[in-house]
Amino acid sequence: MPNLDDREPGDRLTDKLSGASISSLDARDARQTLFLYFSYYTLHGPIICPPALKAKYKAKLGTFANGKNEHFEPKRAGMVESLDQSVGRILEKPDELGIADHTLVIMTGDKDQSTGGLKGFKGGSHEEGVREPLIVRWPGRTAPGSTCDELFIRTDFTRRSWRWLGCPQGRTRTKMASVSCSC
């Protein structure tokens, strides 16, 4: 992503990616369709978070009944909250620009190291190894708080998103960048 070389000591990649994405939304030509895609590297390491968030979750660590929880990592918890704040900044931008009603937001995540009671781990063929979160925000099309049991895999992303946007279906050799869809 361009413009990330202006970092300062202490800058966090999550904040820089969010800021660059928000700048892209601000600078867009309102007459053009915009496709914004980026991936956070958050939680893959190094695990860093703002000192205040680390302190917040370190204080919570002492609230466990036995005084410790070997699976609770204050830095990781702070990093998750920092990521949540960054995603919130991006989700607020279409509202601020008045384009939320025709903005499709798809958020998915990587599998975590925690199995949540399921058998297996990331990369395995058990349910934990293949299940990933997927959140869709599309005002007027998806109801807030609704759920869907349909399976989704990232390799389906292009085909399904084209269908959602009303684009032509079927095999084509047309490059994605040259296809215009009415939304």
Image (cartoon, helix red, strand yellow):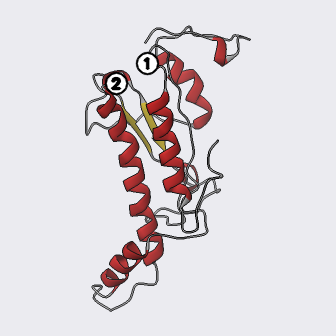
Name the residue nearer the viewer: 1 or 8.
8
Q: Check disc 1 and report the residue beneath it.
A: 30
Residue in view at x 26 percent, y 30 percent: 143
Rendered-image quadrant of the C terminus: top left
In the image shown, does 112 or 78 lie closer to the viewer? 78
In the image, taking residue 35 as reference, residue 72 lies left or right, namely: left
Q: How many marks?
A: 2
- The kind of secondary structure element at disc 2 is loop
Residue 156 visible here: yes
Q: What is the three-letter code of the residue carrying label 2?
A: Ile
The answer to whether one can see residue 1 in this image is no
Q: Is residue 10 above or below residue 88?
A: below
Camera-side residue of 28 and 60: 28
Circle 2 Cα neighbour tier, 10 Å, few/some/many (<14 / 14–19 / ≥20): few
Q: Give the image location of residue 63, x and y in percent.
A: 27, 85
Taking the spot 46% from the left edge, 84% from the top edge, the residue there is: 70
Q: Do the residues labelled 2 and 1 touch (CB within 8 Å)?
A: yes
Where 98 falls versus 74 (above or below)? above
Residue 17 image point, x, y percent: 54, 48
Q: Residue most toward the right? A: 173
On screen, residue 101 above or below 154:
above
Q: Name the residue under label 2.
A: 99
Residue 179 is left or right of residue 68, and the answer is right
On the rendered image, what quadrant is the N terminus found in?
top right
Of labels 2 and 1, earlier in sequence is 1
Q: What element carries label 1?
A: loop
Looking at numbered disc 1 in the image, what kind of residue is underneath it? Ala
Report the Cα–Cα distance between label 2 and label 1.
9 Å
The residue under the point 38% across, 62% down is 81
Measuring from the top left, give residue 15's x and y in whole percent: 49, 55
